[in-house]
């Protein structure tokens, strides 16, 4: 394989998909050597079959607002690869959603899920619908209309969706309610369900906690203690909230959180009481992060991301491409020693190059944020065996999985000088597992 030739070909076929091409380039560049040691891969054009999704469903979603107005949105589901297990991955509801973004996410999900050690293939879906400013009844009607189309393509052993940006417990429960009615069964085709409705303990916490567990493993390789470390977190949704919760518990000091309007900087640190306020603000009132600054009298910066604030560790937990080269340079110049990605692809290629050049601990999302989908996998297991595990049991399993992913990164990503290239480690480990499964299953 010549990476540039494959990329040029994909760029020609999918010219309007920059995020997808960005994600593919990152993976192909780091697996090139390993791939070329296996001529049997090239013989069956494994690389194109791995980069291009198995299939994409797209559909119109029609729904009615509270005043009787009728609206249309686009709905999508990308079934990327199911060699390791049923397609698995979240649904994103955000105005920016388009095929390029979902294809990048489904591609990434395939490698991430391979790393989790659980039997899950990769998929992703969503809609350009936004719940912002909508009533609860409108959100319910949208979710029901979305599933009215989606339901025939998914199932507990075919494709199991979950949440992502704009899709939390509320939306998953509405979608699952409608799915159950249409499919006439209740075996858990969505994950992230309410506890009472078949969900797993620790699923809401899993992505944020998992990212911190991964960070602890990285810090351990350098004998660094997390206690007292100053941390910048971006986002204030599901991932950011539980990242902050775990960090507070471990004695670190989180000084920033953000939303799409701006960020707050609290030099005193966000403590448990302030985090409770953020959770209520974001999950119940659905307000803006600026209200935190108004309430606690700290700095609020409109329209900016938090990477210019001095920190020891940065945990981007909002969205893709939220750290560019300039941000990365500011982080490094300010003494940041580690970046662990709660979000999917939050760092641009320029930012990643700067982290690596400066030898800081840098974990890509497909390794660091795999805790969410891992506990989704554990939710599927519990649904299958019709049992619920305790909080402690799920948390222990999550810790074990994050440790295992770290070990895989070390195995495939250790440089001759002993430093660890987590990008290479995660990509090669994930790729080799998917590739072996694809080879065994023949040309399909
Ligand atoms: P939420 O919808 O709960 O929160 C998203 C947060 O990011 C909000 O604070 C939101 O602000 C902010 N945000 C979203 N889009 C933008 C944007 N374009 N610019 C700036 N800020 C933005 O989503 P999650 O916390 O679930 O997801 C966050 C990230 O983590 C995503 O990249 C997701 O793919 C990834 N992830 C999520 C997992 C999960 O289990 N939920 C698992 C693994 C990864 P606002 O409220 O203003 O929109
Ligand atoms: O990006 C992700 O891993 C998720 N949004 C979670 C997917 C899942 O199926 O739990």
Image (spheres, rainbow, N blue to C red):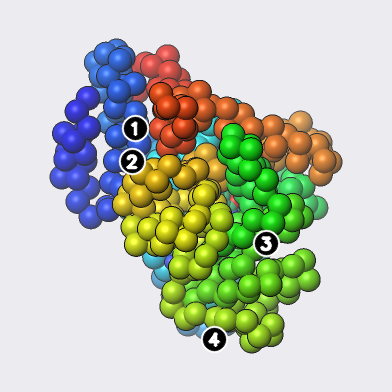
Label 3 residue SS: strand
Q: Is residue 27 left or right of residue 239?
A: left
Q: Nearer the viewer, mark 2 or mark 4?
A: 2
The residue pinned by badge 2 equals: 26
Q: Is residue 262 left or right of residue 389?
A: left
Q: Nearer the viewer, mark 3 or mark 2?
A: 3
From the viewer's side, name the closer residue of 315 and 135.
315
Label 2 residue SS: helix
Distance of label 4 from label 3 (alpha carbons): 46 Å
The residue pinned by badge 4 equals: 67
Q: Do the residues bearing badges 2 and 1 touch, measured as CB atoms within 8 Å? A: yes
Distance of label 1 from label 4 (alpha carbons): 52 Å
Distance of label 2 from label 1 (alpha carbons): 7 Å
The residue pinned by badge 3 equals: 253
Identity of the residue drawn at 27% across and 53% down: 18
Q: Earlier in the sequence, mark 4 or mark 3?
A: 4
Q: Is residue 5 left or right of residue 87?
A: left
Identity of the residue drawn at 77% across and 66% down: 272
Distance of label 2 from label 4 (alpha carbons): 46 Å
The residue pinned by badge 1 equals: 30
């Amino acid at each position: 394989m010549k990476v540039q030739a494959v990329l040029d070909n994909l760029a020609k076929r999918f010219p309007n998909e920059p995020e997808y091409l960005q994600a593919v380039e990152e993976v192909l560049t780091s697996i090139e050597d390993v791939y070329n040691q296996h001529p049997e891969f090239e013989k069956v054009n494994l690389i194109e079959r791995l980069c291009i999704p198995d299939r994409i469903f797209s559909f119109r979603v029609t729904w009615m607002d509270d005043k009787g107005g009728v609206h249309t949105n686009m709905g999508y589901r990308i079934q990327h690869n199911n060699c390791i297990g049923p397609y698995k991955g979240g649904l994103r509801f955000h105005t920016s959603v388009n095929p390029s973004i979902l294809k990048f996410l489904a591609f990434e999900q395939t490698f991430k899920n391979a790393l989790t050690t659980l039997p899950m293939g990769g998929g992703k879906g969503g809609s350009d619908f936004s719940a912002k400013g909508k009533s609860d009844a409108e959100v319910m009607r949208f979710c029901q209309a979305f599933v009215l189309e989606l339901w025939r393509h998914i199932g507990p052993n075919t494709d199991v969706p979950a949440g992502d940006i704009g899709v939390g417990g509320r939306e998953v429960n509405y979608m699952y309610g409608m799915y159950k009615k249409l499919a006439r069964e209740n075996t858990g085709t969505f994950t992230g369900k309410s506890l009472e409705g078949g969900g797993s303990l620790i699923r809401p916490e899993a992505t944020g906690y998992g990212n911190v567990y991964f960070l602890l493993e990285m810090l351990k390789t350098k004998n660094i203690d997390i206690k007292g470390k100053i941390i910048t977190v971006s986002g204030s949704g599901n991932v950011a909230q539980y990242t902050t919760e775990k960090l507070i518990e471990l004695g670190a000091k989180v000084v920033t959180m953000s939303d799409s309007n701006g960020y707050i900087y609290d030099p005193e640190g966000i403590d448990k009481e302030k985090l409770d306020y953020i959770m209520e603000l974001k999950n119940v009132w659905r307000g803006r992060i600026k209200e935190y600054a108004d309430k606690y009298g700290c700095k609020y910066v409109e329209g900016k991301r938090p990477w210019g604030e001095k920190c020891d560790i940065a945990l981007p937990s909002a969205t893709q491409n939220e750290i560019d080269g300039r941000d990365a340079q500011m982080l490094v110049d300010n003494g940041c020693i580690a970046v662990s990605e709660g979000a999917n692809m939050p760092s641009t290629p320029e930012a990643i190059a700067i982290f690596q050049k400066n030898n800081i601990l840098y974990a890509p999302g497909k390794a660091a944020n795999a805790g969410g989908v891992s506990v989704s996998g554990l939710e599927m297991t519990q649904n299958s065996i019709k049992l619920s595990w305790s909080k402690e049991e799920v948390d222990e399993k999550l810790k074990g999985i994050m440790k295992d992913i770290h070990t895989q990164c070390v195995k495939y990503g250790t440089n001759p000088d002993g430093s660890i290239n987590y990008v290479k480690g995660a990509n090669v480990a994930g790729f080799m597992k998917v590739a072996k499964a694809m080879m065994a299953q023949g040309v399909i």
